[in-house]
Amino acid sequence: MNVRSVDGVLVARVRGDVDLDSSERFAEGLAPLREGDAPAVVDLAEAGFFDSNGLHVVVGLRRSLEGAGRRLAVACPPGPVRKLFELTAVERLVPVYGDAGEAVRALREVVSVAAP
């Protein structure tokens, strides 16, 4: 996993599968998003397989960030991973965008509107 800042938004780029065996490593890889003070994006464009264990981690991250007054979005193109977010209605809790650039722009707009 690679975490970088893009226009003031932390973006975690996930590669490979996220399942029961890797969900703990996935959660640990997202630690920089919890520790920062910026809005965050989990980019799943390169996730091969993603199951309910990964969803659980994303929902937990959302709770952590929301408790700190921060926002989270997911970047995920159409396909099986995105379908999981839709079927489980997690997309109602965490907005899902087609790619990381779109997610960063959306979070930046929210920050701009909220700023005095």
Image (cartoon, helix red, strand yellow):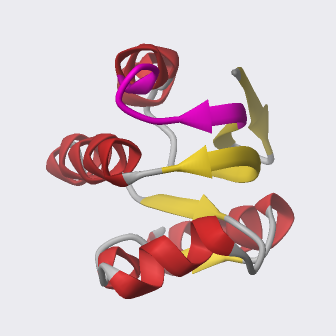
Looking at the image, residue 28 sits to the left or right of residue 17; the answer is left
Q: Which residue is pictured at 25% across the width and 47% down the height?
A: 56
In percent of width and height, residue 41 lies at: 59, 51
Q: Quadrant of residue 8?
A: top right
In the rendered image, the quadrant that contains the C terminus is bottom left
Q: Which residue is pictured at 35% across the width and 17% down the height?
A: 24
Tell me if residue 48 is in the magenta stretch. no
**Is residue 7 placed above or below 36 in the rendered structure?**
below
Nearest the viewer among 30 and 67 is 30
Question: What's the magenta region?
Answer: 14-23
Q: Which residue is pictured at 39% across the width and 27% down the height?
A: 23
Q: Quadrant of residue 6?
A: top right
In percent of width and height, residue 52 lies at: 32, 53
Nearest the viewer among 99 and 66 is 99
Q: Quadrant of residue 15?
A: top right
In percent of width and height, residue 10 lies at: 63, 38
In percent of width and height, residue 81 lies at: 60, 65
Q: Is residue 79 visible?
A: yes
Looking at the image, residue 112 sits to the left or right of residue 89; the answer is right
**Is residue 19 placed above or below 1 in the rendered structure?**
below
Q: Which residue is pictured at 45% across the width and 14% down the height?
A: 25
Q: Is residue 95 visible?
A: no
**Is residue 77 placed above or below 2 in the rendered structure?**
below
Q: How many marks?
A: 0
Tell me if residue 21 is in the magenta stretch. yes
In the rendered image, the quadrant that contains the N terminus is top right
